[in-house]
Image (cartoon, rainbow, N blue to C red):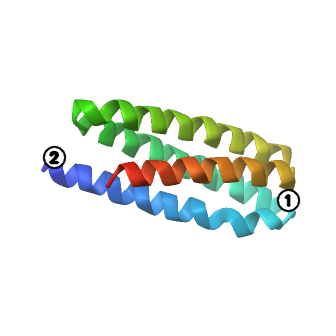
């Protein structure tokens, strides 16, 4: 059962990653509703990622825990900066922060294989 929970967490992480990586087009829409929706979506996906990464890290072998923890911390630092950029409603800053978060997210996904 625990192996099934682990696999479920990994699948949700990959799904959240796919969803977050597809947000890039939404950053070009400067409407008020678009900013609010993007902010809510980022916070929701971050919450799922946090819970599932916590489960994956706690289930990982000791030699893999440190790597995953470091990557997760890096990702959430970038996600927090991205959230702040979205709140500022700056397209340029949001795109820069998005690129940083996307690279960190891709590193996390690669480390899960």
Please give left or right for residue 88 compared with residue 78 in the image: right
Closer to the camera: disc 1 or disc 2?
Answer: 2
Q: Which of these two is toward me, 87 or 100?
A: 100
Residue 103 position (above or below residue 53): below
Q: Pick out the residue farthest to the left.
A: 1
How many numbered marks appear?
A: 2
Write down the residue under mark 1: 32
Secondary structure under the numbered disc 1 in the rendered image = helix
Q: Position of residue 55 (x, y in %)?
A: 31, 40
Q: Earlier in the sequence, mark 1 or mark 2?
A: 2
Q: Position of residue 73 (x, y in %)?
A: 51, 33
Q: Say which quarter of the image contains residue 53.
A: top left
Spatial separation of the CA atoms under disc 1 and disc 2: 43 Å
Write down the residue under mark 2: 2
The circle on residue 44 is: none
Please give left or right for residue 57 compared with residue 84 in the image: left
Label 2: few (<14), some (14–19) or many (≥20) C-alpha neighbours in 10 Å: few
Q: What residue lies at 45% left-to-right and 48% top-to-bottom?
A: 108
Q: Position of residue 31 (x, y in %)?
A: 86, 64
For the residues bearing labels 1 and 2, Cβ distance under 8 angstroms? no
Q: Quadrant of the C terminus?
A: bottom left
Q: What residue lies at 44% left-to-right and 63% top-to-bottom?
A: 15
Q: Which of these two is toward me, 66 or 39?
A: 66
Secondary structure under the numbered disc 2 in the rendered image = helix
Label 1: few (<14), some (14–19) or many (≥20) C-alpha neighbours in 10 Å: few
Q: What residue lies at 61% left-to-right and 35% top-to-bottom?
A: 77
Q: Position of residue 88 (x, y in %)?
A: 84, 43
Q: What residue lies at 85% left-to-right and 55% top-to-bottom?
A: 91
């Amino acid at each position: 059962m625990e192996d099934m929970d682990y696999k479920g967490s990994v699948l949700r992480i990959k799904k959240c990653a796919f969803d977050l990586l597809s947000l890039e087009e939404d950053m070009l829409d400067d409407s008020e509703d678009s900013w609010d929706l993007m902010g809510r979506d980022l916070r929701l996906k971050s919450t799922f990622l946090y819970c599932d990464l916590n489960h994956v890290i706690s289930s990982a072998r000791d030699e893999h825990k440190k790597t995953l923890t470091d990557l997760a911390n890096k990702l959430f630092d970038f996600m927090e900066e991205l959230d702040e950029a979205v709140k500022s409603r700056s397209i340029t800053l949001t795109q820069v922060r998005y690129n940083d978060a996307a690279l960190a997210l891709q590193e996390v996904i690669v480390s899960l294989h």
